[in-house]
């Protein structure tokens, strides 16, 4: 690993830009290559074999473009393709699920409950439940399928989104309690959801204040923190040049540029098209 590493970030679309957003803050002494496989999303409707093939193709692209480390900023690929990626990779590979579970452990006591909000595909994999269990935590996973399109619509502080979030939280907390799990932590298990964290915190404080305090953790931020910890021995002692970011997408470059700026919190100046095949 060079003193100024090149980090590749892979997602099926735009959500992984929240991981890059956190990385730019926590690891500014690096350069970044982001690949969004927008031509083949959503991954959640594909088989595990197909998802693994897509992910490995993206890995090869990032390796060929100089990535020295790969962050799988896609919960579905992290859940279903991480083993295939680590077997095929010549560079270190990190998914978003284990860092999220580790962050939940740090903020919890053994036996505490964790409420995981995620997409239907991630919940169906039960990857978060397994990861939390290895850290002595009981997880209840709740699919929230309406939140991704609301985020992509830009309704991150909209009354409709607030009502949807209130319904999901109410149902999730009730079902978790019925299962004998009392959540002390909510883990955002989708990289779109960090854009909703202020809204979710507001709904929790206002509508569920009678419950014990519940902390919201963002697996995207936790992943960036894990990368920063792994790189800290080689981090330069003084700030260097500003990080460079290259953006690649397999389709809809204009849409990626428009939505990507929202997820990244800064303009995405250029998106280059690549073709990874069918």
Image (cartoon, rainbow, N blue to C red):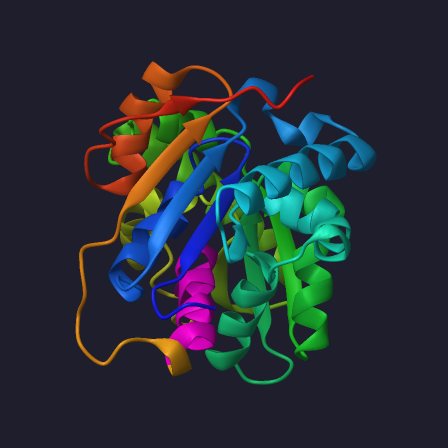
The answer to whether residue 73 is seen in the rendering is yes
Q: Where is residue 251 drawn, in percent x and y?
A: 48, 16
The verdict on residue 245 being magenta is no
Q: Nearer the viewer, residue 43 or 108?
A: 43
Left or right relative to 125: residue 193 = left
Q: Which residues are magenta?
A: 214-232
Residue at image location 53% in from the left, 49% down from the top: 117
Q: Nearer the viewer, residue 141 or 271?
A: 271
Q: Does 31 sit above or below residue 238?
A: above
Task: Name the quadrant containing residue 131.
Answer: bottom right
Residue at image location 38% in from the left, 78% down from the top: 234
Q: Where is residue 9 drawn, in percent x and y?
A: 47, 46
Residue at image location 23% in from the left, 81% down from the top: 237
Q: Does 158 sit above or below residue 116?
A: above
Q: Where is residue 166 drawn, in percent x and y?
A: 41, 42
Question: In the rendered image, which quarter contains the C terminus?
Answer: top right
Left or right relative to 35: residue 150 = left
Q: Does 254 sit above or below residue 10?
A: above
Q: Nearer the viewer, residue 165 or 42?
A: 42
Residue at image location 58% in from the left, 24% down from the top: 41
Q: Where is residue 244 drawn, in percent x and y?
A: 27, 47
Q: How many marks?
A: 0
């Amino acid at each position: 690993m060079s003193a100024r590493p090149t980090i590749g970030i892979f997602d099926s679309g735009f959500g992984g830009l929240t991981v890059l957003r956190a990385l730019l803050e926590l690891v500014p002494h690096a350069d970044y290559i982001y690949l969004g496989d927008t031509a083949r999303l959503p991954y959640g409707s594909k088989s595990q074999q197909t998802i693994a093939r897509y992910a490995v193709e993206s890995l090869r692209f990032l390796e060929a473009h100089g990535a020295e480390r790969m962050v799988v900023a896609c919960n579905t690929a992290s859940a279903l393709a991480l083993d295939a990626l680590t077997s095929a990779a010549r560079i270190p590979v990190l998914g978003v699920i284990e860092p999220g579970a580790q962050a939940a452990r740090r903020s919890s006591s053994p036996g505490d409950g964790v409420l995981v909000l995620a997409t239907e595909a991630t919940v169906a994999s039960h990857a978060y439940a397994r990861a939390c269990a290895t850290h002595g935590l009981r997880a209840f996973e709740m699919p929230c399928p309406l939140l991704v399109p609301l985020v992509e619509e830009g309704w991150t502080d909209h009354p409709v989104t607030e009502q949807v979030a209130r319904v999901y939280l109410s149902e999730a907390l009730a079902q978790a309690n019925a299962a004998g799990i009392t959540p002390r932590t909510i883990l955002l298990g989708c990289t779109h959801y960090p854009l909703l964290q202020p809204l979710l915190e507001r709904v929790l404080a206002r509508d569920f204040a009678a419950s014990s305090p519940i902390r919201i953790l963002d697996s995207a931020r936790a992943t960036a923190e894990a990368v920063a910890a792994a790189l800290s021995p080689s981090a330069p002692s003084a700030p260097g040049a500003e990080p460079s970011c290259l953006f690649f997408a397999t389709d809809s470059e204009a849409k990626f540029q428009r939505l990507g700026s929202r997820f990244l919190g800064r303009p995405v100046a250029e998106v280059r098209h690549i073709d990874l095949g069918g």
